[in-house]
Amino acid sequence: MKYVLAIDQGTTSSRAVLFNKSMEPAFISQKEFPQYFPQSGWVEHDADDIWNSVLFVCIDVMKKAGITGRDIVSIGITNQRETTLIWNKKTGEVIHNAIVWQDRRTSDICKELKKNNHEEMITKTTGLLLDPYFSATKVKWLLDQNEGIRVACQNGDYLFGTVDTFLIWKLTDGQMHLTDATNASRTMLYDIDKGCWSEEICNLMRIPRKILPRVLDCADNFGNTAFKIFGAEIPITGVAGDQHAATIGQACFEPGMVKSTYGTGCFVMLNTGSTRVHSKNRLLSTIAYQLNGEITYALEGSIFVAGAAVQWLRDGLKIISTASETESFALESDLNQRLYFVPAFTGLGAPYWDADARGAIYGLTRNSGPEEICRAVLESVGFQSKDLLDAMLSDAPYIETSVLRVDGGMSSSNWSMQFLADIINASVDRPRMLETTSLGAAWLSGMYTGFYPEQIEFSKNWLKDVRFDPKIEESIRDNLYKGWKVAVKRTLLK
């Protein structure tokens, strides 16, 4: 048996999935790693934790399959986006912990850039809003801490990368400093119209261009793994940021197709084809994927907290012991109580983009308990999804879409997906293949090597598991959503 190895490096864990010739996940290994919160609103990862967890799951999944590196045709990588690392080109030593996409420490930098009227230029160039979420201000912050490092960067002694670039560099034993177009488009340093790094933004941020990786297609030659790692030189031939990989894995190749991934955060991506849509609702224009040198664009809305709120119920409040308990709690909740949970732990994402907002629960009474809080947490994901979809269809009214394809951990909750269908008033399709992010990375890699079919044939393999159709009355939907908007408004006023 031959396999494609998909490396899925996420925010809270790393996973390795071996896909067989039929594009089925045959073996899976997963390992969580620590999160560090040195200050309020700061989120970091230890670079060694990232690398060691990836190495562990790759070796472990090969053990489970009883294979060696010689049985792996190629490797595809998908990763948490925007998370920022800078390391010494010779030693591999990082200058600081990885600054995670959720981190808000650069809020003041963003405010200063907005004050000086740079946001319009940045958005026009990159499709992104001026926000701490993206890599550029994280890189600036790291270099601002040490001018000596900045000078060394100018001399070419250090390298910048998002997690994909860091993994490629480590897997190839420092031979390849590369990224793909999707990850590049999330740095806030990349011109998504011209398909190159922006000299103007780099100069504005005082970021030496020598530290930036070379940008390739999503399916391309990213080099071979060093023999000493897996006992074989395995080609790395597919790379895409996690949400882009999920879009590919969901076969959303036609304009108007939309997917929503419910992981640590929630990310909705609408394929807009070869047309870049300039959002009027503070959504992001981004590169959905790039194949054969051709860019396909998307509108994206990002919710910072989805599954992370369930983790908070488990690890913070300790009112559940497993994520699956939230569904039974929601079913047992008192429907006469109307709680709203606004999960602004690290600010609010699209379409609000308020970095300073913080979480709140509204409607609490003496009778409110774990059941009602759990239900409010699950409902918050549906409400935020409606915010995004309404904004997207307002930005691109010529695009018709009536079905939302879902994936990610929370999509396995029937209660949550039914509420989602009810509140957005559209059908929600959950695929048979829930490993859509890993599948997207695997298909990119296998397609490039000829192990997997081309795009049209791949699309035919997408199979629906369950369709959730809306069931509630319009008046109930409107009242529920009206209450959500009031709760968000009160949160933003703070």
Image (cartoon, rainbow, N blue to C red):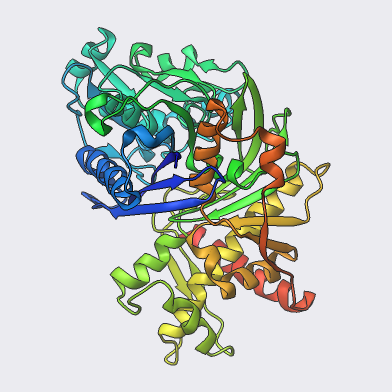
Q: Is residue 388 visible?
A: yes
Residue 181 in picture, x, y percent from top left: 52, 25
Task: From this view, report whether residue 132 is shown above or below residue 488.
Answer: above
Task: From this view, report whether residue 374 is shown above or below residue 96.
Answer: below
* Camera-nearest residue between 445 and 136: 445
Residue 472 in picture, x, y percent from top left: 74, 78
Give the position of the C terminus as an image quadrant.
Answer: bottom left
Residue 194 in picture, x, y percent from top left: 60, 15
Query: Residue placed at 58% from the left, 45% from the top?
Result: 249
Residue with the most extreme top position: 155
The image shows a total of numbered marks equal to: 0
Give the position of the N terminus as an image quadrant.
Answer: top left
Q: Is residue 333 visible?
A: no
Residue 125 in picture, x, y percent from top left: 58, 22
In this image, 418 relative to 197: left or right?
right
* Camera-nearest residue between 271 and 209: 271
